[in-house]
Image (cartoon, helix red, strand yellow):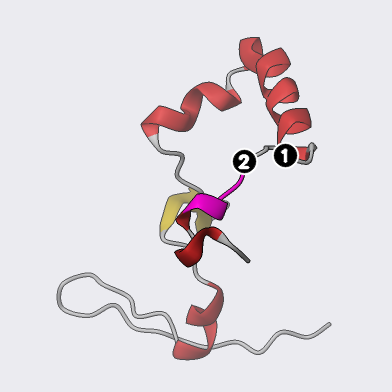
Amino acid sequence: MKTKTDFVKVDSRNRITIPKKLTQKLAYIYKIYEKNGSIILEPVQEIPEEEKWLFDPKNKAIVDELKIALKQKANIDLGSFKKYLKNGSK
């Protein structure tokens, strides 16, 4: 598969503008590094601090239980709301 190549210039403030046709699938954060003379932008998905424990291997059992619980159908009896209807009937 042949890829179309675009060229970009570094501006006076050392910035590069990514062509609009490539921005549709952009991530919010990137890790940038050099590899074999090429500059690599690697998308990174940020995990909020309060959710990091979910990805700790020592919590795998808890996470597995959470996954099972989330798949189960909730069966909650909310009781009757009849008393809130006007005239108490219907």
Tell which of 79 and 65 is nearer to you. Answer: 79
Q: Residue furthest left?
A: 12
Residue drawn at x 63%, y 10% as measured from the top left: 58
Q: Earlier in the sequence, mark 1 or mark 2?
A: 1
Q: Quadrant of residue 14?
A: bottom left
Q: Residue 55 location in percent, x, y?
A: 59, 26
Q: Which region shows up in magenta?
A: 78-83
Q: Residues within 10 Å of mark 2 (few under 14, many from 20)?
A: few
Q: Quadrant of the C terminus?
A: bottom right
Identify which amino acid the numbered label 1 is placed on: Ala
Q: Residue 45 location in percent, x, y?
A: 51, 48
Q: Residue furthest right?
A: 1
Identify which amino acid the numbered label 2 is placed on: Gly
Tell which of 43 and 66 is nearer to you. Answer: 66
Q: Residue furthest top?
A: 58
Tell which of 46 and 33 is nearer to you. Answer: 46
Q: Residues within 10 Å of mark 1 (few under 14, many from 20)?
A: few
- Residue ID for mark 1: 74
- Residue ID for mark 2: 79
Q: Residue 57 location in percent, x, y?
A: 65, 16
Q: Residue 82 location in percent, x, y?
A: 56, 53
Q: Are marks 1 and 2 in contact (CB under 8 Å)?
A: no
Residue drawn at x 52%, y 81% as measured from the top left: 24
User: Circle 1 sits in a helix, a strand or a loop, which is it?
Assistant: loop
Q: Is residue 57 left or right of residue 44?
A: right
Residue 38 shows in this picture: no
